[in-house]
Image: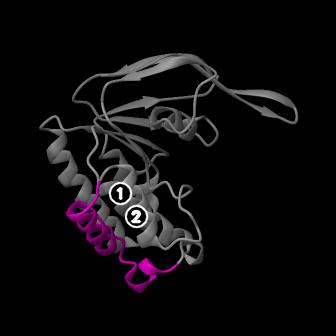
């Protein structure tokens, strides 16, 4: 179970405080995939950051006893002066994936991202698409109870999108065995709608 209890989130702007949402509550039941659909600026990505622990609400609580991924495809956390390989190593150490497990993750991300020799180059030299492929591969290399997916399926060419759909299909087989369920924050997209069994329409207030 994943519960959001009366959370409020706002930001200071030059024109004063802007509320993204106020006092929202909902729960995500077991064995469900949830899709968030809303227009630009409605607060989908902000909510995803809160659910993943990358940001904190002004008030209220987010409660779960399950492991939660960072937003799948998130590229902002990479250190630009480090290579893609070294960034992956850093995340591996944070999550306790050392020794043979680190080698497995490195090989998986290298193969999945199709970066080739660029895997050993500084991330600051990557295009946005290359960063997204690196981030997506890294996210899929780890197992979580909940996956937070924020528009990543719109990234890449047809070949990469096909691989992305395949890996999600495999993850969904595991979800049916209660290993987890993804939360999907995105705009309307035919390919992404298939990833969620239940959708939540959301507008900021």
Q: Residue at x 23, y 60 (%)?
A: 101
Q: Is residue 108 above or below residue 186?
A: below
Q: Residue at x 27, y 37 (%)?
A: 145
Mark 1: secondary structure = helix
Q: Residues within 10 Å of mark 1 (few under 14, many from 20)?
A: many
Could you tell me if the residues under marks 1 and 2 are in contact, i.e. CB atoms within 8 Å? yes
Q: Residue at x 54, y 76 (%)?
A: 122
**Residue 174 is inside the magenta segment:** no
Find residue 198 and name its label: none
**Residue 100 is inside the magenta segment:** yes
Q: Residues within 10 Å of mark 2 (few under 14, many from 20)?
A: many
Task: Give the residue furthest to the left.
Answer: 177
Residue 150 located left or right of residue 173: right
Q: Position of residue 1 (x, y in %)?
A: 30, 22
Give the magenta range.
97-121
Residue 170 shows up from this direction: yes
Q: Position of residue 88 (x, y in %)?
A: 40, 64
| Residue underneath mark 2 | 88
Q: Position of residue 73 (x, y in %)?
A: 44, 56
Mark 2: secondary structure = helix
Residue 117 located left or right of residue 6: left
Q: Is residue 35 above or below residue 168?
A: above
| Residue underneath mark 1 | 92
Of residues 190 and 121, the one drawn nearer to the viewer in this rendering: 121
| Distance of label 1 from label 2 (alpha carbons) | 6 Å
Q: Position of residue 97 (x, y in %)?
A: 29, 55
């Amino acid at each position: 179970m994943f519960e959001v209890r009366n959370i409020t989130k706002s930001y200071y702007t030059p024109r004063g405080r802007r509320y993204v949402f106020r006092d929202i509550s909902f729960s995500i039941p077991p064995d469900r995939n949830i899709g968030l659909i809303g227009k630009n600026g409605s607060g989908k990505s902000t909510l995803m950051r809160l659910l993943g622990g990358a940001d904190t609400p002004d008030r209220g609580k987010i409660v779960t006893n399950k492991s939660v991924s960072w937003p799948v495809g998130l590229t902002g956390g990479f250190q630009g002066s480090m290579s893609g390989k070294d960034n992956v190593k850093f995340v591996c150490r944070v999550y306790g994936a050392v020794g043979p497990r680190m080698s497995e993750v490195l090989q998986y991300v290298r193969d999945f991202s199709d970066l080739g020799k660029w895997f050993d180059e500084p991330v600051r030299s990557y295009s946005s698409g290359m960063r997204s492929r690196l981030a997506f591969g890294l996210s899929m290399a780890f197992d979580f109870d909940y996956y937070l997916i924020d528009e990543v399926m719109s990234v890449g060419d047809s070949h990469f999108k096909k691989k992305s759909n395949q890996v999600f299909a495999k993850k969904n087989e595991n979800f049916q065995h209660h290993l987890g369920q993804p939360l999907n924050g995105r705009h309307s997209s035919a390919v992404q709608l298939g990833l969620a069994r239940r959708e939540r329409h959301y507008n900021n207030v």
